[in-house]
Amino acid sequence: MLRVLAVDDEVPALEELAYLLRQDDRIEQVTTAADGVTALQDMVQMIGAGERLDGVFLDIRMPGLDGLDLARLVGGFPSPPRLVFVTAHEECAVQAFELEAVDYLLKPVRAERLAEAVRRLEAAAAPAVEPGHDDVIPVELGGRTRFVPQQAVWFAEAKGDYVRLHTVDGSYLVRMSLAALERRWSEAGFIRIHRSTLVSAKHVTELRFEGGRVSLTVGTETLQVSRRHSRQVREQLVRQHRDVIS
């Protein structure tokens, strides 16, 4: 069961959102805040009291502390709640997903679309899989369900609201965020090499340095490592393979 906070400076919109959330059986508790500052204070108070907060449904355009600024502050928490943006503005979607939002809803919010956002929030808030456990991702294929094991995945690419899983047998499209998959599989040796790419370290067979650029080979594919991630990737791969040898 999820405990969430809804934030919006427009009272009718806030009341409608809170009402719809309370109709969902997966939601245990809904608290509300009418501005960013109050929301931040409420979250700090909840954390200080040891209360669990799984997600924040957050408007963007608010006076004072807007939704994007609030999200950046929340990202600095030790265990930040997941974010779902609820807004009338389409143009902020890229910024929202850069902040690892679970979903981005446009007003007026439809009940079925909100239900999908809650499903994504529930998946993102699920505990990480324990190391050594071979997690399985169900994939729908034309009326059939294929179960793709974590151990078979070479790498994963972000594709909008989806993630494409690449394996020796082919690739599969799954409706989830790359950030959620990273949280779910990080303990199993999956590392971020680019804002849109997550790689299984155990499947990496080669690391290259050419003209200041870093790339790696995983399976039959050669992937570029972003400059931002290159040092972390190099250190993590070296450390992981050293641990295997020792």
Image (tube, grey):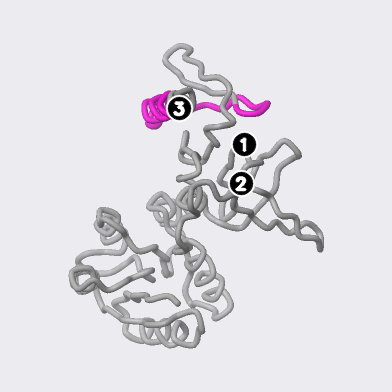
Which class describes the residues within 10 Å of circle 1: few (<14), some (14-19), or many (20+)? many
> For mark 2, what is the residue?
150
Closest to the observer: 58 or 223? 223
- Whether the residues at callouts 2 and 3 have beta carbons within 8 Å, the answer is no
Tag shown at residue 167: none
Q: How many marks?
A: 3
Which class describes the residues within 10 Å of circle 3: few (<14), some (14-19), or many (20+)? some
- Quote the CA–CA distance across marks 1 and 2: 9 Å
Q: Quadrant of residue 66?
A: bottom left
What is the secondary structure assignment of the residue under circle 2?
Answer: helix
What is the secondary structure assignment of the residue under circle 3?
Answer: helix
Q: Is residue 96 above or below residue 111?
A: above
What is the secondary structure assignment of the residue under circle 1?
Answer: strand
The mark nearer the N terminus, 3 or 1, is: 1
Residue occupying image coordinates x 50% and y 43% = 188
- Quote the CA–CA distance across marks 3 and 1: 15 Å
Q: Quadrant of the C terminus?
A: top left
Q: Quadrant of the N terminus?
A: bottom left
Q: Quadrant of residue 84?
A: bottom left
Q: Is residue 227 magenta?
A: yes
Amino acid, disc 2: Gln
Residue occupying image coordinates x 30% and y 81% = 32
Q: Quadrant of residue 79?
A: bottom left
From the image, give the main secondary structure of the stretch colored magenta.
helix
> For mark 3, what is the residue?
237
Which range is magenta? 218-240
> For mark 1, what is the residue?
154
Q: Residue furthest front?
A: 246
Residue occupying image coordinates x 64% and y 44% = 165
